[in-house]
Structure formats: C-alpha cells, structure tokens
Amino acid sequence: MMHSLPRFMRTLLFWVIAAIIAGSLLGLVLPQWAIVPFATFNDVFGKFLSFCVPLIIVGLVAPALADLGAGAGRWLLITVGIAYGSTLFAGFATYAVCYEVFPWLLANEQVKELGEPTNAVASLLGDQFDIPQMFSVMSALVVSFVLGIAMAALNPRTIRKAFDEFRDIVMVLIKRAIVPCLPLYIFGTFLNMSYTGEIASVITAMLKVIVVSIVLTVALLLIQYVLAGVVAGVNPVKALGRTMRAYFTALGTSSSAATIPVTYECALANGVSRDIAGFTVPLCATIHLAGSMTKITAFSMAVLFMTGGNYTLGSYALFIIMLGITMVAAPGVPGGAITAAQGVLAGLLGFNDPMYSLMVALYIAIDSVGTATNVTGDGAIALVVNRFAHGSLGKEKAHSYEAADDILSATD
C-alpha cells in the first residue's frame, strides 16, 4: 500500500506534518468522546516507549562504545575527540544563545498544561494501566558505559556477539514498532492540545524555535569552517563553498550515510588527502552530530521554557555531555536520534509524554537541516585532521579504517 503512494508521501516528515495539521484542526471540532481513543493510544504508546528506553540505551550505547574502542589507533581517537568536542561546543553554544533569546522570544507562548496536563482528554484506561521499566534510565546509562568500556578493553567474543545481536533487535524495534507509530502519537498530542485551546501558542512557538535553530546551524557551520581554516591554513569561505554540495545532498536525503560519497569528494576538493578523507568522513558520519545537538538542545529548552520547567546550566551541562554520547548510538533512520535521546530527555530533564511528543514533532520537522549540518561539519574536521596528520596515517591507517567500517556497519 505504502509503495503505491508518491515518494514524498512515504517519508516520515510528510506524515508528521500531516499529523500536526490534522490534529490541530480536528481538535477544534471533535467532541471529547471522539478524542478518547487517541488519548488512550498515546497513553499506551507513551508507557511502552518509556519501558523501551532503558533497553534502547543498553542495546545501542554499549555496542557503540565497544566499537569505538576496537582497534582504535591514535588518529581514530584524535578524530573522535575532535568530533565529540565539536558536538559539545554546539550544545553549550546553543544553550548560551537560547538562554538569552527565549525569555523575550517566547514570552507570550506559555503552555503550562503541557507540563502537567489537567484539562486534556483522559485515557480510557485511567491511571490503572502501567508498564514499569525493568531498570531506570540512569542505571541503563551507567550499565552501558561500564559494559561498553569493558568490551572495548577485553573484546570478549561471546558477549560482543550477544550485544551485537541485541542491538539488531533494538534497531528492528525502533524501525518497525516505534518510528511508524510516531505520526499517530504526534496526532494524538496535537489533537489534545487543540481541544484544550493550547494549539495557537504551541504552533507559534514551534515556528519561532525552528527559525532560531536553523540560524544557529548556519552560525555553527561558519564557526567550524573559520576554525578549520585557521588550523589548516585555507580560506574558510571557499572551503565551506566547496562542501555545500554535501549540504544540499543531505538536505534532500536526510541521511548521513547516503551523503558519504559526496562529502568524501568535497573533502578531496578542499585538499584533504585520500587517506584522511577515506578515514574521517565515514567515521564522522556516525559520531559527529553537532547539528542534531543544536536542534535537540534548542527544542528542549523551548519546551521547558514554555512549560515553566528548569533549564539552568547545572541541569543542562550533564544533559549535553550525555546526549553527545548517546546520539552516537542512534541508528541511521529518520527519527532514530530523537528516539535514542528520549532517555536523557526523560531521565535528566524530566520530560513527560506530551513534552516528548512535541520534541519529536519539532525535531522531525527540520530533520534534514540537522543532518546537512552534521555532514558539512565533517568536512571541517577532515581539514583539521589532515593538517595534523600531514596526509598520512602511517601504521595506524589499517586499524583506523577497520574501526571506522565496524562503526558504520553497526549503525547503518
């Protein structure tokens, strides 16, 4: 059935936008009894999602950390460090800008009910239905780091194989159970918000935050290429211009993996050696997520500001650090990064189901912009690594290629 539809109608973005529009309009006219089934679905799906979060974290983060350590040569570790530093910079810079901008930009878009809904249509199941988590989100993060680092150091074949297979199970869960249900989940949320009269403030705020996040991603790319130009001794404007083909390719495909060949060619056009480009571009396509970090940080701060939540630096420092690591494990499917990020959103920022649903809608609405920012930034990292390595990885090249290939095959 889906394959008979036009290509643009088979994308997650199309169905998310359709869900937002339909939910916003139908909530104005439907009676309460007609909204109850969708509220019930959101209740069940939200609790199922909460139950899955610790399993998703363990299934994705632990193998990803083990893969990063497998055969890691000096230049792989340096590249990982630069990519993670770029992602952290994006998060903290976004926090600083949004902390100053949102108080006046979103001053009239307060939706307290989103944080503690009282007037929303209740689920048919009431408060009696629950799916307890097997263990907490924080426990899942700690277990993932302990097991991932241990597997990277010891490389136990049996346990590694078990975790690799568990990761495959989790990715099937995300691709076939969670992501396909997200549009209906978003539809139910916007239906409820429209019914309670909050939709005007939410839509206005969404448009403002989307514009801010796009501006921030452009500023991020300019900063990345200015710094890369200073380090590598190249003209940053020309270097960025040569990489724009990768930006527009990612904008159309919403896939870092699909853009790797184009990003590789752009890196070569900027004077990066084939050895360095062949190593850094595939690796950074998985671990460099500065654009995604910018979007999630900005969107989460907007949701917290709108609902009167806490977004102090103390609460966000750990969130940004943990998010930068957790997103490395996100599978290469639309909606994968925001699904993997739910653990830190709920565990560290206290997001409830309606808040997370709004986050998903915001994130997917400009998913391709974050992906395009990620891959274009990969070209800047390639320039920096090329300058430090002087075009040769030496004896470590083979090990680094192998590790990069392992990471790509694990997340594609």
Image: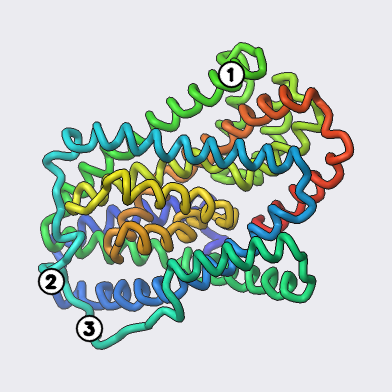
Q: Nearer the viewer, mark 2 or mark 1?
A: 1
Tell me the residue at 51%/40% (across/down). 87
Does dot 3 land on a helix, a strand or a loop? loop
Tell me the residue at 68%/65% (across/down). 150
Q: Nearer the viewer, mark 3 or mark 1?
A: 3
Is residue 321 in view from this perspective?
yes
The image position of residue 18, as x and y in percent, is: 35, 54
Mark carried by residue 31:
2
Residues marked 3 and 1 touching at CB (< 8 Å): no
Circle 3 is placed at which residue position? 127
Q: Crowding near pointer 2: few (<14 within 10 Å), some, many (20+)?
A: few
Circle 1 is placed at which residue position? 241
Q: CA distance from mark 3 to mark 1?
A: 55 Å
Q: CA distance from mark 2 to mark 1?
A: 53 Å
Tell me the residue at 70%/75% (across/down). 162
Q: Quadrant of residue 294?
A: top left
The image position of residue 311, as x and y in percent, is: 27, 48
Tell which residue pokes out farthest to the bottom in this image: 128
Establish if 327 lies above or below 142. Answer: above
Mark 2 is on which residue type?
Pro
Horizontally, residue 336 falls left or right of residue 185, namely right
Mark carried by residue 124:
none
Mark 3 is on which residue type?
Asp
Pointer 2 or 1: first along the chain: 2
